[in-house]
């Protein structure tokens, strides 16, 4: 498999329909390496659908998504550079945390899968629980394992859907610092969240979505809550 | 590609060894099926000629449908099938990994089912073990090749439990016919190798055609 890389991700006039329902409507934006882009909006605004299209899981009904000069036709090579943390955690409850991470590390072509998995679990603060089945973990612990699964292959593009769900204050702090490290290492991070307090100070750019449309775009956003209230709550 | 297939097969086997859910339900269902037919069709210790072959293949197909539905239900519950679609492994490798896991499970079930059918219906069934193993294995691969594709396609359908057999059984009728005819020929007092070879070639042809079609269509059907 040929290795590919890209410096930016762009969406041009991207729409996605499910039957007659329009989940995403004519969205255009661009984001580049070393930035965190936040997708903010109420339930049903189109955040998860947009993330699924960026992850290559859904095809846009119209419009183009580009990864640098690459399109989605780059297939497996492109997927090797994308990490996704979804609403569902994509973990096998019967397998241990190490087995889950080693399995996905293997599928991403990493050589020493067990060492990688153990290192990732240490980063998540779950080194002592690495041989426990994921079914015995709390929601917050599963979320931490799932985040490591999404990032185990050091992706260029990290797509995170509600990454703070179920995390306690300490774990949230660890995640925020992890995301900043990712950004500083040159990754493109796109995250959908409802947690405006956490997003404030973390995001470099923010897109406010409502009814499948971008209603406001901000760079170096501050006062997210008041902006959210004025553009979404009106 | 081979590494991805191996990883998926090993993962499926590890999950199965931990839960034993599929092995127990598939085996219990298949054995119950054979016993019910035995109570109704075996009179004074004898069954009509060829009945054993039919019972064997009915049990394989019913149990196979159960296993196919359940193995993808597992992937749906934690949305892990989406995770498999996200990894850089080729989509055909994901298909072949899931197919191999299901075939191994069904072959394990058949290792218990075949002697049971031989005991209850056809004492000559095991007289040509090489030919019987070839027929049962190629038939199982053909059935599972179609079933794996359909089960993956239907994983997000609300009525998947109803739709899977509705789609699967009509398309796999050639497997059933060839499997039954070859198994009947194997259990004949005068073994006719030409007849068995003919039906075995039919099964191999079915396997090649449907695995090729499945490898070709798996990527587009799994991308929304």
Image: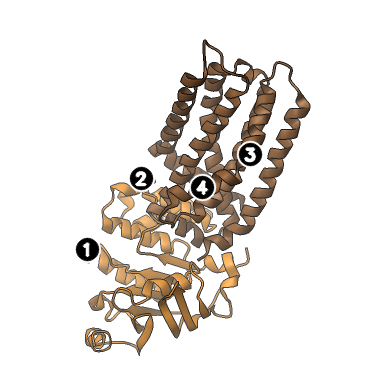
Chain colours: A orange, B brown
Location of mark 1 (residue): A168
Residue B137: x percent and y percent? 62, 34
Contact check, label 4 and label 1, Cβ < 8 Å: no
Callout 3: chain: B
**Which image quarter is the C terminus of chain A in?**
bottom left
**Which image quarter is the N terminus of chain A in?**
bottom right
Left or right: residue A205 compared with residue B14: left
To the question of a shared chain for discs 4 and 1, the answer is: no
Q: Would you say residue B99 is visible in this rendering?
A: no
Callout 2: chain: A
Choose mark 3 or mark 4, whichever is in front: 4
Which SS class for mark 3?
helix
Disc number placed over residue A131 in the picture, else none: 2
Q: CA distance from mark 1 to mark 3?
A: 55 Å
Location of mark 3 (residue): B175
Residue A24: x percent and y percent? 42, 78
Residue A12: x percent and y percent? 50, 84
State the residue in front, B80 or B204.
B204
Residue at 76 percent across and 25 percent down: it is B193
Disc number placed over residue A52 in the picture, else none: none
Choose mark 3 or mark 2, whichever is in front: 3
Residue B179: x percent and y percent? 64, 33
Q: CA distance from mark 1 to mark 2?
A: 22 Å
Question: Which of marks 2 and 1 precedes in the sequence?
Answer: 2
Location of mark 4 (residue): B166
Choose mark 1 or mark 3, whichever is in front: 3
Left or right: residue B216 compared with residue B14: right
Q: Residues within 10 Å of mark 4 (few under 14, many from 20)?
A: few
């Amino acid at each position: 498999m040929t290795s590919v890389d890209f410096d930016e991700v762009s969406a041009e006039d991207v729409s996605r329909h499910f039957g007659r329902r329009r989940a995403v409507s004519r969205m255009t934006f661009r984001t580049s390496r070393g930035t965190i882009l936040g997708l903010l909006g109420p339930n049903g605004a189109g955040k998860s659908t947009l993330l699924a299209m960026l992850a290559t899981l859904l095809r846009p009904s119209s419009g183009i998504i580009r990864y640098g000069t690459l399109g989605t036709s780059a297939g497996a090579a492109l997927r090797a550079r994308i990490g996704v943390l979804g609403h569902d955690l994509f973990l096998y409850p019967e397998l241990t945390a190490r087995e889950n991470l080693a399995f996905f590390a293997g599928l991403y072509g990493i050589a020493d899968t067990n060492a990688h998995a153990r290192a990732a679990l240490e980063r998540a603060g779950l080194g002592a629980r690495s041989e426990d089945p994921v079914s015995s973990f709390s929601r917050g612990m599963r979320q931490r394992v799932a985040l490591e699964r999404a990032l185990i292959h050091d992706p260029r593009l990290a797509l995170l859907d509600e990454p703070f769900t179920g995390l306690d204050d300490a774990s949230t702090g660890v995640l925020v610092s992890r995301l900043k490290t990712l950004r500083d290492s040159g990754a493109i991070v796109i995250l959908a969240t409802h947690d405006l307090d956490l997003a404030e100070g973390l995001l470099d750019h923010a897109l406010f979505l409502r009814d499948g449309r971008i209603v406001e775009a901000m760079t170096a956003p501050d006062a997210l809550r008041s902006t959210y209230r004025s553009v979404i709550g009106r | 590609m081979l590494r991805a297939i191996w990883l998926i097969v090993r993962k499926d086997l590890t999950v199965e060894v931990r839960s034993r859910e599929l092995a127990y339900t598939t085996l219990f269902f298949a054995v119950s099926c054979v016993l019910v037919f035995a109570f109704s069709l075996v009179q004074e210790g004898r069954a009509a000629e060829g009945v054993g072959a039919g019972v064997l293949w009915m049990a394989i197909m019913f149990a196979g449908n159960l296993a196919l539905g359940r193995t993808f239900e597992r992937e749906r519950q934690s949305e892990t099938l989406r995770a498999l679609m996200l990894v850089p492994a080729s989509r055909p490798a994901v298909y072949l990994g899931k197919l191999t896991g299901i075939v191994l499970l069904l072959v394990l079930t058949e290792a218990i089912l075949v002697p049971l059918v031989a005991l209850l219906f056809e004492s000559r069934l095991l007289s040509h073990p090489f030919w019987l193993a070839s027929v049962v294995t190629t038939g199982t691969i053909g059935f599972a090749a179609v079933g794996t594709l359909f089960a993956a396609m239907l994983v997000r359908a609300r009525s998947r439990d109803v739709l899977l057999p509705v789609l699967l059984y009509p398309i796999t009728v050639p497997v059933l016919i060839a499997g039954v005819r070859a198994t009947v020929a194997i259990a004949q007092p005068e073994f006719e190798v030409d007849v068995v070879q003919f039906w075995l070639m039919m099964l191999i042809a079915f396997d090649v055609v449907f695995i090729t079609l499945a490898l070709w269509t798996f990527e587009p059907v799994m991308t929304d």
